[in-house]
Amino acid sequence: APEFAVFQALNRLGFRDRFEFQSSKFGGRATRGGLVLDFWIPSLGVALLISGEYWHYERAGQVAIDLIQRQQLESSGITAVFIDEDDALQNADFFVSDALRGIDHSKLTRGF
């Protein structure tokens, strides 16, 4: 799974015990406007969100929701970086390393 690849990459890159997995923000999924971050690295103020092809790019309206969530996080001082599932599976260390520096290679950022 792409989340596991990112989890392993974070550990290899020296972030063992320095990140939260499935971290609720703004009340979590149970609250309107709340969300769950796939990975939250408090020391860097960076949220990593894994984007699957089906759940994030093929479902109507989901891209708009992701963009709104990015804006919501960034207006709260959190750098939101999306990592596409295929990138996480092909070269997690590269994409996670860039993501930790705020570099987003996702289709969401590239505009498809």
Image (cartoon, grey):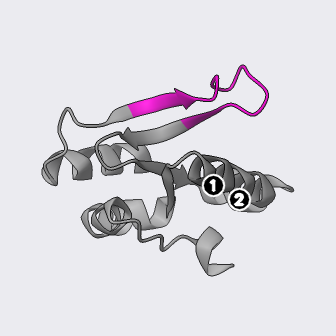
Q: Position of residue 111 (x, y in %)?
A: 68, 79
- Check residue 67 in the rendering and tell me which mark sits there, or answer none: 2
For the C terminus, the quadrant is bottom right
Residue 46 vertical position relative to residue 38 in the rendered view, above or below: below
Give the residue at mark 1.
70
Q: Separation of disc 1 and disc 2 at Cα?
A: 5 Å
Please tell me which residue is depicted at 30% across the width and 37% down the height of the picture: 19
On the question of residue 13 being in view, the answer is: yes
Q: Which residues are magenta?
A: 21-36
Can you tell which quarter of the image residue 107 is in?
bottom right
Helix, strand or loop under label 1: helix
Mark 1 packing: few (<14 Cα in 10 Å), some, or many (20+)? some
Q: Position of residue 7 (x, y in %)?
A: 30, 43
Q: Position of residue 58 (x, y in %)?
A: 76, 60
Query: Does the magenta run of residues contain 71?
Result: no
Q: Are marks 1 and 2 in contact (CB under 8 Å)?
A: yes
